[in-house]
Image (cartoon, rainbow, N blue to C red):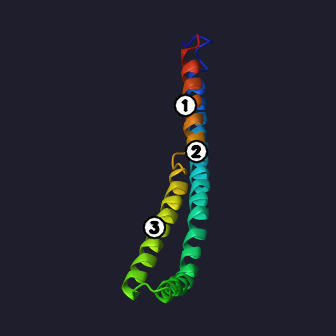
Amino acid sequence: MIPAGLAGIPDLLSDLTGKLAQLVRAEIRLAQAEMADKATAAATAVVPAVIGGLLLIPVLVVLLLAAAEALTDLGMSTTAALLVVGTTGLALAAVLVWAGVQRLSQISAEPHRTVRQIKRDVAMAKRQVEAP
């Protein structure tokens, strides 16, 4: 015969298993939502830079040719003028690429909130199991 105080243990274990399954599903949904937010933030950071870069290409070509022509008009050889303008354009492009990479590096792919919540859940589960 099972003592009255122990009769509910299978029910408690079954309930605990069900609750843990619900908790895991909720944590997975939280992680998915957090990763979706981070993907949106990354896309938001990249898209304007790409679109701006594509629109600026033809404009920059015209402006760089005009700058080289102006240097030529000032007495510089065509080759030297093109090298000066090309080198300056390359330096500017490098700075812009660096700035974009810095923005992207600030976006962490780790689901920080989910990890923090899982740690709390594990600690709570440990306390529940260790409780007398």
Q: Look at mark 1 in the image and give the residue it sits on.
A: 119
Please state which of the two labelled residues, at mark 2 or mark 1, is closer to the viewer. 1
Instruction: For label 1, count other residues whose C-alpha is less than 10 Å away and answer few (under 14), some (14-19) or many (20+).
Output: few
Q: Position of residue 71 (x, y in %)?
A: 49, 83
Q: CA distance from mark 1 to mark 3?
A: 47 Å
| Image position of 72 (left or right of 51) | left
Neighbor class of circle 2 (other Cα within 10 Å; few <14, some 14-19, many 20+) is: few
The three-letter code of the residue at mark 1 reads: Lys
The residue wearing badge 2 is: 25
The residues bearing labels 2 and 1 have C-alpha atoms spaced at a distance of 15 Å
Seen in the image, is 85 located left or right of residue 36? left
Tag count: 3
> Which secondary structure, mark 2?
helix
* Residue type for callout 2: Arg
Expressed as whole percent of the image width and height from the top left, the position of residue 49 reads: 57, 69
- Is disc 1 placed on a helix, strand or loop? helix
Q: Nearer the viewer, residue 73 or 107?
A: 73
Earlier-in-chain disc, 2 versus 3: 2
Please name whichever residue, 102 or 108, is drawn nearer the observer in this view of the structure.
102
Per the image, the residue denoted by label 3 is 91
- Specify few, some or many for label 3: CA neighbours under 10 Å numbering under 14, 14-19, or 20 or more: few
Earlier sequence position, callout 1 versus callout 3: 3
